[in-house]
Amino acid sequence: MVVSLPLLPTMETIPSVLKKYFGFSDFRPYQREVIEKIVEKRDCLVVMATGSGKSLCYQVPPLVVKKTGIVVSPLISLMQDQVMALKQRGIKAEYLGSAQKDFTVHSKAERGQFDILFMTPEKACTVPTSFWSNLLKAGISLLAVDEAHCISEWGHDFRVEYKHLDKLREVLLDVPFVGLTATATEKVRFDIISSLKMDNPYVTIGSFDRTNLFYGVKLLNRGQSFIDELVREISKEVATGGSTIIYCTTIKDVEQIFKSFTEAGIEAGMYHGQMNGKDREESHRLFVRDELQVMVATIAFGMGIDKPNIRQVIHYGCPKSLESYYQESGRCGRDGIASVCWLYYTRSDFAKGDFYCGDVKSEKQRKAVMESLLAAEHYCVLTTCRRKYLLEYFGEKNSADRCGNCDNCKVSKEERDMSREAFLLMACIHSCKGRWGLNMPIDVLRGSRVKKILEAQFDKLPLHGLGKNYPANWWKSLGHQLISRGYLKETVSDVYRTISVSSKGEQFLASSTPDYQPPLILTLTAEMLGEEDNGNTQEEFKTLSTSELEGFSEAEKTFHQMLLEERLELARSVGTAPYAICGDQTIRKISLTRPSTKARLANINGVNQHLVTKYGDHFLQVILKLSQGLNLSLDGEEKVPMASLQTNGVTKVSPLTNKSKKLTSAKFEAWKKWHEDGLSIHEIANLEARSAPIKEQTVAEYLLEAAQEGLPFDWVRFSKMIGLTQEIISEIQGAISKVGSTDKLKPIKNELPEDISYQHIKTYLSMRNSGISLETFQSGSNQTGKDDELAYNASNFPDSTLETCPDRHCEDGISAKSLAEQCDLEMDEVPLPVNSSEEQKLSNASEGEFTRKRQKVSETNEENSTKLKATESSVVEWMKNLDEGATLSTILEHFNGSSEDSVVELINGLECDFLIYRKGNVYRVL
């Protein structure tokens, strides 16, 4: 008896799921690798920055394998937001928890009727074993533990109930466990793996660098004047539709700032632990749905927000740890748009160690809390790059000393030699034997005679009183700079901190005398200059509205704002959040392209099938109405009208001038020298007319930009010049497949041998985006007798602009015009020889060779005489065999039995049905 086994889902369905449900054509770095490992049932630990796409790692596998994915999440409000957003993507999602009012959810979940099921750790550990047994029969694809750092006692949000999740291992024997977090030091990562009893987990640690975020810190004097200025500045952002969270360390601060917004006539939400649950829930709901643009909250609001379009996160007071600060500030700009994180602190914030340790029972955790507070304090008083400090704290190496997007890197600050003052402070700390905190040696330097100094006889030290010219905060600021630069070190014992001289500091002291010290240039901080903030915050805030819409015309800016308002109204009418319908990035793309058809709407990154099906007609009507009212054209994305697309492989080239606004004269001239004068990259870089040679790499970059601007380009010749072979292309394709994204080149480069350069990667990506077929490339060695075939294949390059100008000599030393005459062909039928690797000159070719050329063309024409008609199934089946996809011209050429209009209409329909998608000008099957 033959048993037919069910077909297992294949990896080819992963891109289909990504486009269909999430609207994206490419994965971000590391996502695809993790998804594939989960589908293979391997445990995974995923440490990736907020906004980098962690959630996709557990959302895609259940849709691929058609089994329920279980997600353990710490907060009900967070689960509710995620369920709401997933439903708007056409994904069956629900949650189990105390706030669930639909009592049928439990039984439906047990029968496997949901793609993704969220639950709290308490719920996961208390549902009966029968629930898991029944669900296992229906199928479980994974158990994901979100915010997994809560498992670890070394984590900043340790929760005891997370420690019990390992019990599920005994029940869910063949289910992969996935831990996900945005903040996990090496200790925390080890703790997560151990606590969840992970078996040989696949560990992915992405970059913690949120490049779209600006980081700034400012010392302030607490008072109403500062709060009033804060309210005025935030009100400007509210006017542009940007959302802001203000995190406070106390409920008193929350209420005071909330009151100031109310008195200023600005609607704001408030969220803290002493509010009743209903009020907190309503405040959260209004903020998530853009009914309120400002939220003033304690850290209780930290993990419970899944809103991607927050433009400012402001901390009013130093957070208790860098982990919590990174987590909270990470709520900002999750959609990738430029956003701002400001932290305002006072010295008193650093004395809250006892308070934070109040409920902590174990000595291990008290030590972790104190060390975390210490790191946050160092971040506040830092004078060097804040981004570099953050990245290195989380174990990420960062070679750049300046990021260019934090206050310390953007604002030039005064520096001077502080070697004498540093010598006095380090010498005094050394004399105090390293048994005290920073306050004691500072009091000694300032000449204090308090009881503890007299009892320790520190008043007898020769250093006593030598630093009385500076206030205590001046010395503290100096002390923190010396700590950050490695001259001093702080040690935590229980809730106490002691300071001592490091080995680097000892070397400095050894090379110093009371009369001479080696130069030590340090920054004069605001405290040293006596410039504590008294309310003047205006220059500290960054206006985002201009940079957000850079490249928009005034009419497009108006269109964008009106489209945001239309999205808000649509969200209100269906009872969801605006971002759940589509994100701000997608709205920006729609505003720039203004699609006129569902197919063009579906092609925009971020537009999923659910949006097109449910809201597509509405969006198109709104786009048409707004465009007409503002006198804007539709389909701004299209560079070439559909009717003018070439259907053959040869593009006729007329004399060109530099009409591109983006291409500088230097780049255009380099292209002319290469394309029209036939010079090599080396010759262009070393032109005699230049005052000095330029790098050949620079010339290559110029030429690629010209190609991307649509100027005629011989890709085969260019590839030979830079040494791009088929073998290298295959290596690059493999690296891209492994990384899962082309957003950043560095992860791709890291997967490749050293001899494959960034230039090779950029060229391949440019060719791919231009729809260039790679089948015509030969693997490094020339093959005799293949020149005819190469010439013909080159003519099939979709949308490639092969050199056909009759006034210019082609690569093989013969003009296109004379070649046409010898072959007795019409000009637009000439398959030009463009492969410069064939050194044989056509002018020396025998008559027999040209006869064979004509025979090949004739054979091809006979083959093309078989007319193929395009149908939905025939197009999709044909495209399944094209790894590199096909341009419209290639599709029209293949299905030559159908009219152009009918093929275009059919392709549009396939796009709307998400059977194919377009990236650049290349169509690929899903």
Image: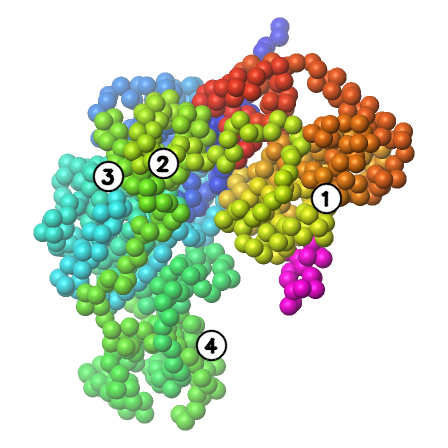
Asked whether, in this view, residue 801 is left or right of residue 451, the answer is right
How far separated are the C-alphas under marks 2 and 1? 40 Å
Q: Residue at x 71, y 50 (%)?
A: 677
Judging by the rendered image, the residue that carries numbered circle 2 is 632
Question: Whole-percent x and y of residue 211?
Answer: 42, 53
Judging by the rendered image, the residue that carries numbered circle 3 is 290
In the rendered image, is residue 313 in sight? Answer: yes
How far separated are the C-alphas under marks 2 and 4? 64 Å
Question: For residue 122, which quarter of the picture?
Answer: top left
Judging by the rendered image, the residue that carries numbered circle 1 is 808
Viewer-nearest residue: 640 or 343: 640
Question: Label 4 neighbourhood size at 10 Å, few (<14), some (14-19), many (20+)?
Answer: some
Question: Whole-percent x and y of residue 749?
Answer: 60, 49
Viewer-nearest residue: 127 or 698: 698
Judging by the rendered image, the residue that carries numbered circle 4 is 504
Sequence order check: which comes first, mark 3 or mark 4?
Answer: 3
Asked whether, in this view, residue 636 is left or right of residue 923, the answer is left
Q: Residue at x 69, y 13 (%)?
A: 866
Where is the N terminus found, in terms of image quarters? top right
Q: Amino acid at mark 4?
A: Lys
Q: Amino acid at mark 3?
A: Asp
Question: Whole-percent x and y of residue 124?
Answer: 33, 32
Over which residues does the magenta segment extend? 681-697
